[in-house]
């Protein structure tokens, strides 16, 4: 349900509010989050581990792009044009993570819990976290840094 609501907000931002870069990036973030949330709601309702693993891997296609899109959105928000040399590696790592999620190196063997199946972290999952957490926090930290600057330095 929440994945669908988030997607509706993104569609609204994309269609109704105009096609500025910030609206497009916001819409892209909502698509990524929606893919993650909808896929994992399907994971929890799967009857067999193979289906749960498939949908978990689909969900990581959304999760993997959230950090790069977040940084890009925040740079646009504070009116700092993102440098292609900076953003391109972030998007490349996101794409690499999508590909790795399709193997047993990132996600493996779903385990059954009382709420349903959940894919288990595999050997490269710590690498995913080393990318996901700092990059996701980079955008808000850029905004805070910009906010704390003296007005004449902005």
Image: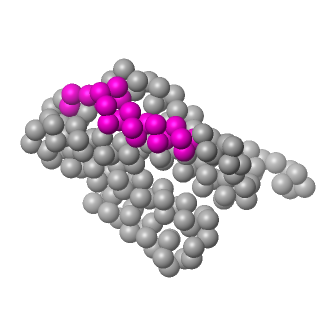
Image location of residue 3, percent across then percent down: 33, 58
Q: What range of the chain is rendered magenta?
A: 90-110
Residue lying at 60% horizontally and 64% vertically, measured from the top left: 22
Q: Visible in this render: residue 101? A: yes
Image location of residue 88, percent across then percent down: 61, 45
Describe residue 3's horizontal placement relative to residue 22 as left or right.
left
Describe residue 46's horizontal placement relative to residue 75 as left or right.
left
Image location of residue 21, percent across then percent down: 61, 65
Residue lying at 38% horizontally and 33% vertically, measured from the top left: 100
The quadrant of the rendering that contains the C terminus is: bottom right
Residue lying at 82% horizontally and 48% vertically, measured from the top left: 149
Q: Visible in this render: residue 143? A: no
The quadrant of the rendering that contains the N terminus is: bottom left
Image location of residue 87, percent across then percent down: 63, 46
79, above or below 95, in the image: below
Asked if residue 95 lies in the magenta stretch, the reply is: yes
136, above or below 15, in the image: above
Residue lying at 68% horizontally and 48% vertically, measured from the top left: 84
In this rendered view, identify the residue nearer to me: 24 or 117: 24
């Amino acid at each position: 349900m929440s994945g669908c609501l988030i997607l509706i907000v993104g569609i609204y931002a994309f269609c109704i509010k105009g096609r500025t870069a910030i609206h497009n990036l916001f819409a892209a973030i909502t698509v990524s989050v929606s893919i993650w949330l909808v896929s994992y709601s399907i994971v929890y309702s799967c009857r067999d581990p193979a289906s749960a693993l498939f949908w978990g891997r689909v969900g990581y296609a959304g999760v993997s792009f959230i950090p790069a899109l977040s940084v890009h959105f925040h740079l646009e928000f504070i009116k700092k044009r993102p440098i292609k040399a900076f953003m391109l590696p972030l998007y490349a790592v996101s794409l690499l993570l999508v590909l790795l999620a399709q193997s047993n190196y990132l996600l493996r063997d779903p385990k059954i819990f009382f709420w349903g199946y959940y894919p288990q972290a595999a050997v490269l999952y710590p690498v995913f976290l080393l990318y996901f957490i700092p990059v996701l926090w980079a955008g808000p930290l850029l905004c805070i840094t910009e906010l704390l600057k003296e007005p004449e330095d902005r």
